[in-house]
Amino acid sequence: MKLKNTILTISILAGLFFAGCGCPAQKQVAVPPDPGLCSAPGMVASAMQYPVGNAYGRAIHLSKLTPTQVIVNEPFDYKIKVQNLTSQELINVVVSDAKPEHMTINSSDPDMRVVEGKVLWDLGTLAPNESRTISISAVAVDMGSITTCAEVTFETPTCAQIDIVRPQLTLSKVAPSESIKCDRIPLTYILTNEGSAAACDVVIEDVLPDGMMTSTGDNVVSFNVDSIGPGESQEFEAVVDASTSGIFASNATASSKSSGTITSNMPETMINQPALAIKETCPAAKFIGKSLTYEITVSNTGNGVARDTIIAATIPENTQYKKSSGGGMYTHASPGVVTWKIGDLAPGETRDVSMKLLLDKPGTLFTMATAKAFCAETASDSCRTELEGIPAVLLEVVDISDPIELGAMETYIITVTNQGTAEDTNIVINALLEDTMEYVSSSGPTKASVSGNKIAFEPLASLATDGQASWKVNVKAIGEGDVRFRATMNTDQLGRVVLETEATRFYQDLD
């Protein structure tokens, strides 16, 4: 039998809910945040006017396309079309159709579900102006008429978007791999925010190892960071000192309420220190008038470079500076000084210098050599040379007149001169007269005693270098001929007698 045209009854139910986000048709008003990185985040107001629809107040169009008649027990198809008439998304779109008598629904595209006598199609979200078509395959099972009423429900949300962000801090520490103990040690801390939000109220701390401290004597380096934005890096610098040599290492931490506590790397710094040793060598004894060579050796026995190393050697008063090796510079003062600027001395390195001096009088020549360098304790050594002179006395005897007539007086002068470089002591002078001479008198620095033709003078205690002493002996010529006046000398330094004679002609007048 023929069925009449089915009249479509459309019921539109709109469910309106607040959920989800990203709705382009809704109105959003931005509330600007405080300009500080760590101020409260800004707010965005979201609003929606209800009911939702297009310019004519319509939100959705639902249409149903069915045959005007079908044959019992023969399958037939019909369609339901849904169209979003708005410029925004409609979500949770559900189309329902009553399950009529005399008809069985075999299948549909999309799939259906049956709940309490209704057939439901869950279409999900319809984009702005999007349409969907439901294709249904059914069969009439009895004579009569079929009336099916389709309905649609949907939701139009009011959306707000909240960004979820967090800071992510990294901290690195930079320190020199080695340094000298007396040098200040620079430390650099690099704080980086690799996250998507600012980190606020960050505290950086570095607890220094034993033996290392700040200029104020503290063992902690700390920085307070008000804020650090996403993608931003900040550097902080500190200068510390080491009280001893060795290896020093520590890591720093950065803490904040929003990012917790992170730890930096732990760089090691080797603190080195130079140590100087000096040795001065010289002759233990020398005769005066000879050049003396003083050898000076300086070594760096530490593990750090001895920067700007200087050697200085003193020269006593009355000592002549002759020359020096290695660019030594002589400064005449009291005492004089020879200075060598040898520059940097590497660990284990040795440097040799020398100087030549001259002292022309007996005594002790004492010099002091010192070595100084940056961050090294001063090293010193001394050397002394005993200088001795060489005594060399000259004995001379001369007569005042020659020839001498019998009965006249003759004077002999005995002279001792120290031509050496050392004092001579205990000078003993004796004289011997021949039978043709008669002792009259004598004079000189020491008294004489006469025994027969022998004259013995008391010893002269000492005779200095370049010193001279003279004795006179007066005799009377009592016999003619070629006579000899004899004088002898001995001293502590000589140890043997020196003999000197003077010949004089004594004569008898012919009258």
Image (tube, helix red, strand yellow):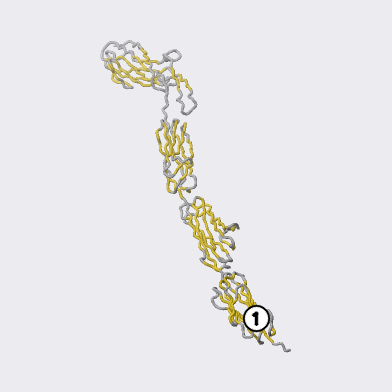
Residue drawn at x 28%, y 20% as measured from the top left: 106
Regarding mark 1 in the picture, which secondary structure is present there?
A: strand
Vertical comparison of 93 with 340: above or below:
above
Residue drawn at x 69%, y 80% as measured from the top left: 401
Instruction: Pick whichever, 328 or 124, lies toward us.
Output: 328
Asked whether residue 337 appears in the rendered view, the answer is: yes
At label 1, counting other C-alpha atoms closer than 10 Å, the crowd grade (few under 14, some 14-19, many 20 or more) is many
Residue 189, x across and y down, in percent: 46, 39
Residue 410, x across and y down, in percent: 67, 80
Residue 162 in which image quadrant: top left
State left or right for residue 94 relative to residue 499: left
Instruction: Pick whichever, 294 or 165, lies toward us.
Output: 294
State left or right for residue 394 relative to residue 384: right
* Image quarter in which the C terminus is found: bottom right
Instruction: Pick whichever, 262 or 103, lies toward us.
Output: 262
Q: Amino acid at mark 1?
A: Val
Q: Circle 1 is placed at which residue position?
A: 475
Vertical comparison of 477 with 133: above or below:
below
* The furthest residue to the right: 511
Instruction: Pick whichever, 276 or 119, lies toward us.
Output: 276
Vertical comparison of 472 with 225: above or below:
below
Q: How many marks?
A: 1
* Image quarter in which the N terminus is found: top left
